[in-house]
Image (cartoon, helix red, strand yellow):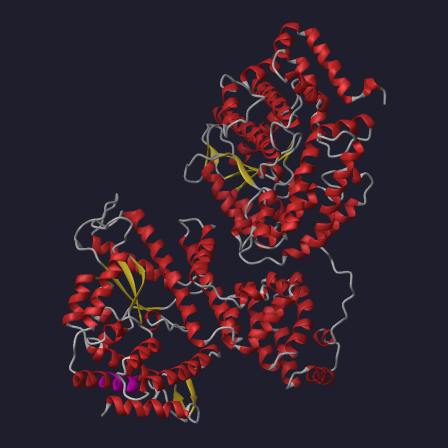
Amino acid sequence: MQPSEYPAKQAEIKWHHWQAAEPVLAAELRVVAGFEAELLRVWEGSDFVAQYCLKQPELLMRLQRTGALARRYAEGELDALLGDRLGAVADEPALHRQLRRFRNEQMVRIIWRDLCQAAPLDETLADLSALADACVARSLALLHVWATEKHGVPRGETGEPQSLVVLGMGKLGARELNLSSDIDLIFAYPEQGETDAVRPLSNEQFFIRLCQQLVKALNSQTADGFVFRVDARLRPFGDAGPLAFSFDAMETYYQSHAREWERYAMIKARVVAGDAAAGREVMAMLQPFIYRRYLDFGAIESIRDMKRLISRELKRKGMADNVKLGPGGIREIEFIGQAFQLIRGGREPELQIRPILPVLRVLGEKQQLSAEEVAELSEAYRFLRRVENRIQAWKDRQTHLLPESEAGRLRIARTMGFADWASFFAVLERHRLRVQAHFDNVFALSEEVVAESPLQALWEQELEDEQAVALLEQSGYAAGATVLARLEAFREGHACRRLGQRGRHRLEELMPVLLEAVAQSPVPDVTLERILKILESIARRTAYLALLVENPTALSQLVKLAGISPWIAQQVARHPLLLDEMLDPRRLYTPLKREGLEAELETALAAVDADDLEQQMERMRQFTQSNMLRVAAADLTGGIPLMVVSDYLTEIAETVTRKVLEQAWDCLVAKHGRPSNVVGDGKGFAVIGYGKLGGIELGYGSDLDMVFLHGNDNPNGMTDGERPIANDLFYARLGQRMIHMYTTRTPAGTLYEVDMRLRPNGNSGMLVSSLEAFEQYQKNAAWTWEHQALLRARAVAGDTEVIERFQRLRREVLGRERDPERLREDVREMREKMRAALDKSKDGHFDIKQGAGGIADIEFMVQYGVLRWAHKHPDLLDWTDNIRLLDTLAGHRLFTGEVAEQLAGNYRALRAAYHRKALSELPGLVSGDELLQERAQVWALWQRLMTA
């Protein structure tokens, strides 16, 4: 290469020509410290900038004088500058001219700052994206006005004016535009209708013409160049579809016709121009298409297909020099991130973001990628994007190919900060090799030939019945003929017959593996029956079949837990979303405590619109079911003891209750304002848990016994909103809304069944009582059994001041001295009434809870003891659960001998038996010859304490 061909020398020659042509301007610029060195560096790297400055010499002076080359633009500044430039534009030719001149001037500024390393990569990409946003939005605004002047205002069915919404896809959507990128756009409008002109156009005609004008304004080549090349082929049906779609047409397309790669493309979609409210509407409509509500392992096969296409494409000639599409290029980094987003984004809202670097960071935080992978992929991405920009800066052309000429290679190396091509290329290759290794690792396709399961032929009906029965029994099933008949019924059942081709293929992959896994379980025949019921409930949702095919861990956990517990099998059949919990055994068998529960619930609700009550309720139900499953899994495998199980289940209910109260309160305050006399951040309202909730003894299917109290001393006062209502009405509606949120059935079922009958005067009483009324009732009208219930009462959510007042009142009421004999008679009489009404012991079976010597007898003895002696020993009122109450009674030696200790031991034994029945979806009955010692001891103690 001759010296005159060196890029630096070429830049010097151009600079000399410019100085000769503009001596006055040159003299002023030469005295600016460091300016000439920067100019030579930029002109060496960008012939586009050099040529534009030679044509428009005053531009260079203006950029220098205004300081535009030395500072970062503020957010919105580019849009404001373009708005000023277009202020006097009155027609399309003038719009085209001003857009191109503005674009070229800003490209000079952006490339200058990039090549001088005055702007980091993030700023360069953001500025280019902001420039495109401004050009699209400002052009659309003018063109829309001119179109309405000519054709009238497009209106919907109700007469509402309609506006176009422009979605930016790809790098524009992610605000990662490069120096000479196409912009991928999709156009949509809200409703069909027509313009209000004398000779109206349909909305479709109006908006298609508007889109054509917008594309022309940006895309067409004139004497001033172009603005941005526009690619609209990502729209529904591609080039075969109309340029603009109504929202309904778009929704139909994405629900019924869209392909998997279109989900991949939509990850980066963003509203870049048009009506903001309509834009939010269309993005909300697209959200379920982009991100499934479950972990979408059905996407894996499509992702692998795309990966295979990429791998084949890499072998094409010339790909080695392509920094975007070639081996270890930019596309492979983006593909890694977006594949995880497709699979996990529906359940993990943190992944519902567009730029790739934050996606990689989140994947690292969630341990989907290692810290090393995230660091190396991020570093490579930044390096490759800078190389891409340096390539495109030279001629303002969309290319991703490394230069072939010696001069071009030296230019790229120097603009990247290297002395020569060899040192630059060594670093480039290091990055690309790392990216390719990580890409291959993430999408590794097993090359091993998997041995066919011997049960494959059985499932595919290639065996005679005798052979099939023998094979099943050899594999571990007890009754081969019965199992074979059940499999046949399953295959011919409604769920399987309605499967599509993809679902049938998934089922064929799953069943042999499933049959083999179940055969290894302790009770294969029973386990298979439970799992077939699950498959019947999920068969049409092929993503769940894919999850089990793709994840041996999930399948093994399902087989394990379904074999142990019909309750878990029933829950999964009713709520298939729970299959996601099977993916990670560390998570599955480690229930969350209070802080973890609160954080997870906040995350689950963060992605839901604050006004979308149905989705809020759905997410809370999913949260509750998932966490109850974790508790059950740990419980069944011995990970946590029985008494701790109730602690976990109670904390789940309390976490949900606090959130239900918060959301119900926020909704009513938005409508009616806050009740008067409410101080600070308080609500003047509290939720009191009774029964198992109050006693921290919830089981898997327990109702929530609750009482609602308000502490507002001015019930007739009014709320302070625009639609005020009386304070007491506000609190009544608050209680009603909470019950609605608990009990309304959504696709995920109900949250909890709620029992409010323990409130003053039962079902005939006010839903929400004032503390004053509650106090009067408890002191003057409550029966002994209601004070027994109050022993188990505990505040679980609400206003601190109201809770404190309730606690003082509870201690005062329960701490009164009572006539021991009258108390004993009242408690015994109530227990006998309850036993007569509820005891299901018969035909050789014993009712664990209500039978003579059962759980209820222990609870009534404890309540009798506390009510009898609380006036002397106030610490008896510190707890609401039976075990700690028995411990306190024992500590004070209030029950003679070892009574308290015996009751505690028997209580644990009976609770464990009742608990096992609940997990087995069986009534709380045992055979008459079970638990004989415990029952006899409890009954003897009942006779001794309560009938003596």
Q: Along the line of sight, which residue is nearer the eye, 101 or 146?
A: 101
Residue 878 screen position, x and y as percent? 28, 70
Q: Along the line of sight, which residue is nearer the eye, 461 or 592?
A: 592
Please say whether residue 832 is one of the residues in the magenta stretch: yes
| Relative vertical location of residue 905 with respect to residue 811 in this rendering, above or below | below
What residue is rendered at 46% in x and 59% in y? 596
* Residue 832 in view (yes/no): yes
| Relative vertical location of residue 68 with respect to residue 727 in this rendering, above or below | above
Q: Along the line of sight, which residue is nearer the eye, 19 or 443?
A: 19
What residue is rendered at 66% in x and 16% in y? 36
What range is drawn magenta here? 829-837
Q: Along the line of sight, which residue is nearer the eye, 706 or 512?
A: 706
Residue 472 screen position, x and y as percent? 69, 82
Q: Main secondary structure of the magenta part?
A: helix
| Relative vertical location of residue 413 with respect to residue 717 in this rendering, above or below | above
Residue 769 screen position, x and y as percent? 22, 62
* Residue 700 in view (yes/no): no
